[in-house]
Image (cartoon, rainbow, N blue to C red):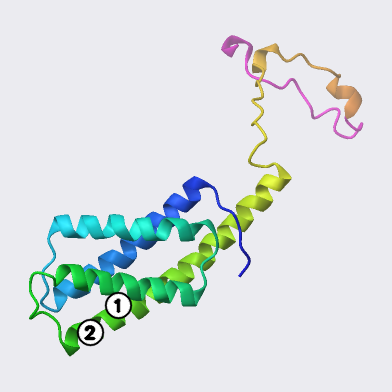
Amino acid sequence: MASTSVKSPWRLARTAAGATLSTATAIAVHLSTGGIVTPLTATVLIVVAAGIAWPLTSRRVSTSQLLGLLVLCQGLVHAVASAGDPTVGGLPMLAAHGVATVMTLLVLVRAERWAWQLAGVLRSLRSVRLLERPIAVVAIPKLNSVAPTADVRRCTPSVFRGSIGVRGPPVWAA
């Protein structure tokens, strides 16, 4: 995919979403298969994942690059969370981490596609200057201050001339 530069708010959003989703999925799988993760460990892991993801969010990330990052994230979460208890693991946990990697990959690939499509739409709107043009505020005149500009009888055909009477609110309402 083409390398595209991205501004900081966009990078920050992509970094936060990717790091949080991948780490949270890995932690959820680790917990569901008997592992233990403390809140402090979870926070540190999300910050580390964001630090790894930040340099990569300056451009489009291919599916194979994303897969590598997710495998790294799953392995990092498992290694750090299982450091205190070497008995945690086995085939069920390995399979669960594998399934979580594939599920997260599918979600992030779709999210990347949508994010870059949205960036393209926003870029095209900026090029048309729709987002940079200030909105004009139009003053609406009072109805009482508008003076009639033409005689109604001159503008109507003679067929309707007799049916048009005096129009407007009653004199006592003004």
Which region is colored magenta?
A: 156-174
Residue 116 versus residue 159: which sits nearer the camera? 116
The majority secondary structure of the magenta stretch comes to: loop
Is residue 28 visible in the rendered image? The answer is no
Tell me the SS state at disc 2.
helix
Residue 139 versus residue 98: which sits nearer the camera? 98
Q: Which residue shows up at 8% across the image and 69% down it?
A: 84
Residue 89 versus residue 110: which sits nearer the camera? 89
How far is mark 2 from mark 1, CA to CA? 10 Å
Question: What percent of the width, then of the height, locates residue 19?
Answer: 35, 61
Asked whether residue 164 is drawn in magenta, I would say yes
Would you place residue 36 above or below residue 50 in this image?
below
* Residue type at numbered disc 2: Leu
Which residue is situated farthest in the bottom direction here?
A: 91
Asked whether residue 6 is drawn in magenta, I would say no
Report how many numbered discs are placed on residues in the image: 2
Place residue 22 in its image quadrant.
Answer: bottom left
Q: Which residue shows up at 48% across the image and 46% down it?
A: 9
Q: Are marks 2 and 1 in contact (CB under 8 Å)?
A: no
